[in-house]
Image: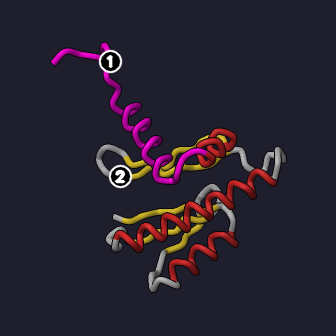
Amino acid sequence: MSNEYILFDALLCRRFEKFIADRGLKGEVRPDPIEGFVVTLRDDLPDDVEQAIEDEYDALMTEQAGLIEAAGDSGERTLMRVVATLADGSSCLVQLPAAQARRLFEHFSVEEIHDLVSAIVQSAMNPVEGPMCKKP
């Protein structure tokens, strides 16, 4: 297993790589097939290191959202992608309209967005028929 982080801006991606390298870690960076870059790190990191990486990524995502907002309605970005975890533990990418994705990033952390999108995908893939409330 590994942790993946997506960044759309090359400069922000390089800053994230440097942040990781400054902690003695090496991430694999590959271009995203649609847009941007995916940085992959191993997932067996100490909790404090992982938290520092998440905090930096959140800060970069906030900066990235500002860059997207500054681009205005030029149509440059019409989609954003979020990694979702499926019930079997595998990952998939979910595309969201940029306007809704921006609103999510304004109010939720990256981890909360991942959890929300994962729950929606899992529910859609395994629909439950019948009433929402049932007696045991």
Q: Is mark 1 on a helix, strand or loop?
A: loop
Q: Quadrant of residue 17?
A: bottom right
Residue 96's place in the image compared with 125, above or below, is below
Q: Quick one: which residue is furthest to the left in this view? A: 136
Find out whether residue 112 is within the magenta segment.
yes
Residue sitting at x 69%, y 54% = 65
The residue range painted magenta reads: 107-136
Confirm or deny contact between disc 2 and disc 1 (CB under 8 A).
no
Q: Looking at the picture, how far across and down is residue 130, in whole percent?
A: 30, 14
Q: What element carries label 2?
A: loop
Q: Mark 1 points at which residue?
A: 132
* Residue at the image point whose x is 31% and y is 13% from the top: 131
| Residue 69 is one of the magenta-drawn residues | no
Q: What residue type is labelled 1?
A: Met
- Left or right: where 10 falls relative to 52: right
Q: With respect to residue 124, does 96 lie above or below?
A: below
Relative placement, left or right, of 41 versus 132 is right
Disc 2 crowd, CA 10 A, few/some/many (<14, 14-19, 20+): few
Q: Which amino acid does label 2 sit on?
A: Ser
Relative to residue 80, is residue 78 drawn left or right?
right
Q: Which mark is residue 90?
A: 2
Residue 7's tag is: none
Within 10 Å of disc 1 (Cα), the crowding (few <14, some 14-19, many 20+) is few
